Amino acid sequence: MTDIQGYKGVSYNLLSKSKVSIGDFIDVKTNNESIQGSLMPRYEYADDQHIVIKMSNGYNVGLRTKKIISIKLITKRSAPSFQPPKTPKLDPKLPKVAIIGTGGTIASRVDYRTGGVHPQFSTNELYAIVPEIGKYAQIHTEPLLNIYSEHINADHWNIIAEKTVKEITEGFDGIIIAHGTDTMGYTSAALSFALSNSPVPIILVGSQRSTDRPSSDAALNLIGAVASVTRIPFSGVYVAMHGSVNDSTVAIHRGTRVRKNHTSRRDAFQSIDISPVAFFKDEKVEVLTEDLPLKNSSLQFKARCQFEKDVALIKFYPSFNYKIIDHLVDSGYRGIVFEGTGLGHLGEDCYQSIDDAVKKGLLVGMTSQCIWGRVNLTVYDSGRDLLKIGVIPLGDMLPETALVKMMWALGNAQSGKEAEILMHENIAGEYLERSTFERRKKYEFI
């Protein structure tokens, strides 16, 4: 029985008639030429007007069925399968780095049935696929989760934080966390607060495209993360992702100041209102700032990993229904972070509901839905009214970071008042003294 996975209709009938299977080395004669290669699978939503073969030069080519005159079997072969190379040997002279796997695109492969990607690689396989990282550190892989980042919640932050603490106490010089990109900014903020006095650097790394795609950014991001975690002089939590659309630069972003600003570009992640803290290019790491806590391997630290789930992030918009606020209060929520307009404004229809929320003990914070800049509730009457009600202005904190910080503050404080005090403190670089007026910097590594 022939295996022609993913093909249907016209293409299926053509291949079935020719008695060839996925992986077979075949000769396809068209109106113009004869092409030889291995028959590749297709995904279930692909059209039925093409077949795909992999030529000897490694490139795939799609051939229109209406132009195909004949298909002949040259050699029977097995369907393509993934066989990871052997893991490189450890060099005891190098720093010890733990790579904790949580899933995401960086640990995924294309599923030819659906055409999508799904978590498949273990962290050990990921290391074997990118053996270059072995020249920067003794790599120890630690599988923990294997899920897409949109499924990660506050419970997972706690699990990741506790695993990270364990690796640090066992003497690792740096921690890499392989993570999906969709919620990487949330997790990096969560770890920034939970592990705010970590003695070693912790870097989250991901990829926009899976490791088996020719355009994948996974390898360079992972190499940049490992090289940086061993060479930067400071501790704290960071994100390592492409700093340009080409394969030249990896930017290292502070964990509380980074945002994913594009759905698919390889340089989707940007530091907001500041530049990245470092760059990796041509096997070198350039540190751009010295205003960060330094490594201190002798430091004993205690993680604060609890997060309150009943906190909401609400984006205000014209005709916003204030009853949403009432519903959250009635549902037992303990905090709300608003993304207000401009300097931090909401429609007056919301004021009474917010006043009721504050009087019932909820923390209510204000950020801006603008990407750059900061809130200022003293400029207009609207802002001053919100201040009088008890809304907490959160400066230039990113809304996502503010949400995570409020979850963390309420989860670890002994009272609402203590949580409010924590919200005002600059714990992990979430506040900046001043915001730049430049909309966006093009980060060039010199």
Image (spheres, rainbow, N blue to C red):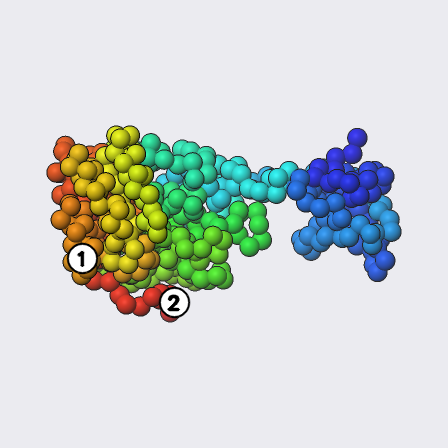
Residue at 48% in and 45% down: 106
* Lower sequence index among marks 2 and 1: 1
370 and 250: which one is in front? 370
Quadrant in which residue 241 is drawn: bottom left
The residue identified by callout 2 is 442
161 and 401: which one is in front? 401
Is residue 410 rendered to the left or right of residue 190? left
Quadrant in which residue 350 is drawn: top left
Is residue 418 rendered to the left or right of residue 100? left
Q: Which mark is residue 381?
A: 1
Given the image, on which type of amino acid does mark 2 rest? Lys
Residue at 44% in and 62% down: 244
Given the image, on which type of amino acid does mark 1 rest? Asp
Q: Position of residue 57 (x, y in %)?
A: 69, 55
Q: Quadrant of the C terminus?
A: bottom left
Residue 299 versus residue 243 in the image, above or below = above
Q: Position of residue 238 (x, y in %)?
A: 32, 50
- Whether residues under marks 2 and 1 lie with C-beta atoms below 8 angstroms apart, the answer is no
Question: Comparing marks 2 and 1, which lies closer to the viewer?
Answer: 1
Is residue 6 rendered to the left or right of residue 296? right
